[in-house]
Amino acid sequence: AQIKDQANQAADYNVRWYIIKDKLMDELNVSLSNKDIDMEIENIVKENKNDEKKVREFFSDVNNRSSLEGNLLNQKLFDSLSEFANIKETEKSTSELKNKKEE
């Protein structure tokens, strides 16, 4: 019963995220072309010159190319969303964080 409940929660989360992500991508006009994917593969090849053949074989598989596409889309989406974020960085020592946790 516990495993079933966890699986249902995970499925619910994934479906919700997929719908939200799809809507955000539409609203922000986030998309990729085959050229974008090919350029990323070329960058990966450049970083792994000794394994160029293996890299090309790996991405010739439709599933691996699709996975790369998904990762690139997610990155592009998060880059677009970060334009709207107001991020404030603060530095704190470990002791400051420990003291705050104890309070």
Image (cartoon, grey):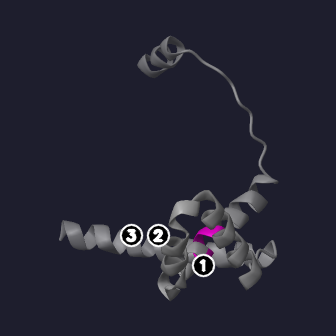
Crowd rating for badge 3 (residues with CA inside 10 Å; few <14, some 14–19, many 20+): few
Q: Amino acid at mark 1?
A: Ile
Report which quarter residue 32 is drawn in. Answer: bottom right
Residue for badge 1: 19
Query: Residues under labels 3 and 1: Cα distance?
Result: 14 Å
Q: Please state, as top left, top right, bottom left or bottom right, where the N terminus lies in the image.
A: bottom left
Residue designated by label 2? 13
- Residue at disc 2, secondary structure: helix
Residue 16 visible in the displayed image: no
Please report the residue visible at 69 percent of the width from the left and 60 percent of the height from the top: 78
Q: How many marks?
A: 3
Instruction: Name the residue nearer the viewer: 31 or 44.
Output: 44
How crowded is the residue under tag 2: few (<14 C-alpha within 10 Å), some, or many (20+)? few
Of labels 1 and 2, earlier in sequence is: 2
Q: Secondary structure at mark 3?
A: helix
- Name the element at disc 1: helix
Between 17 and 80, the one lying in front of the other is 80
Q: Does the residue at mark 1 contact the one at mark 2 (Cβ under 8 Å)?
A: no
User: Range of the magenta residues?
Assistant: 69-73
Whole-percent x, y for residue 7 in the image: 31, 72
Given the image, on which type of amino acid does mark 2 rest?
Answer: Tyr
- Which residue is denoted by mark 3 in the rendering? 10
Residue at the (74%, 58%) spot, across then down: 79
Q: Are marks 2 and 3 in contact (CB under 8 Å)?
A: yes
64 shown above or below 46:
below
Q: Residue at x 20, y 66 (%)?
A: 2
